[in-house]
Image: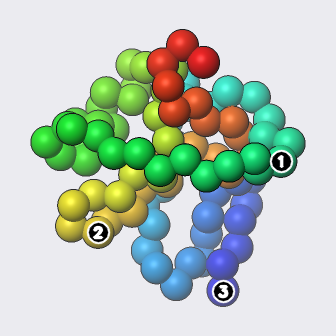
Amino acid sequence: MLAIFSGVIKNQPVKIVTRIIPNIEHGILGKINSIVIHRTAAPTAESTLNAWKTKKSGAHFLIDKNGKIYQTARLDKICCHKEGK
């Protein structure tokens, strides 16, 4: 059963690795207006995760080439997918 606590997915049937990066979260998410899917040219998921630690943009989830899923922002927070937003 899927459960969400404080915006973080817990007890999911598919293992999602929690790696919350606070600086990519921007305020409270009132409602979902869209789902943005984009990709990165970074060579590894780890390099993307490290880059997001120094930026103000990122995504709620990152899916690695091997299928591993990382939750990087809480679901109740706004996450900007472009720098400067």
Neighbour tally class for label 1: few under 14, some 14-19, many 20 plus, Cα within 10 Å: few
Q: Is residue 19 visible?
A: no
Q: Nearer the viewer, residue 21 or 59?
A: 59
Q: How far apart are labels 2 and 3 at the CA level? A: 20 Å
Q: How far apart are labels 3 and 1 at the CA level? A: 23 Å
Q: Is residue 81 visible?
A: yes
Residue type indicated by callout 2: Gly
| Residue drawn at point x = 50 percent, y = 41 percent | 59
Q: Residue furthest right?
A: 30
N-terminal of the two: label 1 or label 2?
1
Residue type indicated by callout 1: Lys
Residue type indicated by callout 3: Met
Please give the residue where the numbered disc 1 appears in the rendered image. 31
N-terminal of the two: label 2 or label 3?
3
Please give the residue where the numbered disc 3 appears in the rendered image. 1
Q: Nearer the viewer, residue 48 or 1?
A: 48
Please give the residue where the numbered disc 2 appears in the rendered image. 67
| Residue drawn at point x = 73 percent, y = 61 percent | 5
Secondary structure of the residue carrying numbered label 1:
loop
Please identify, in this view, whether the residue under mark 2 or under mark 3 is nearer the observer: 2
Q: Nearer the viewer, residue 18 or 82?
A: 82
Q: How far apart are labels 1 and 2 at the CA level? A: 28 Å
| Residue drawn at point x = 52 percent, y = 84 percent | 13
Q: Residue furthest top?
A: 84
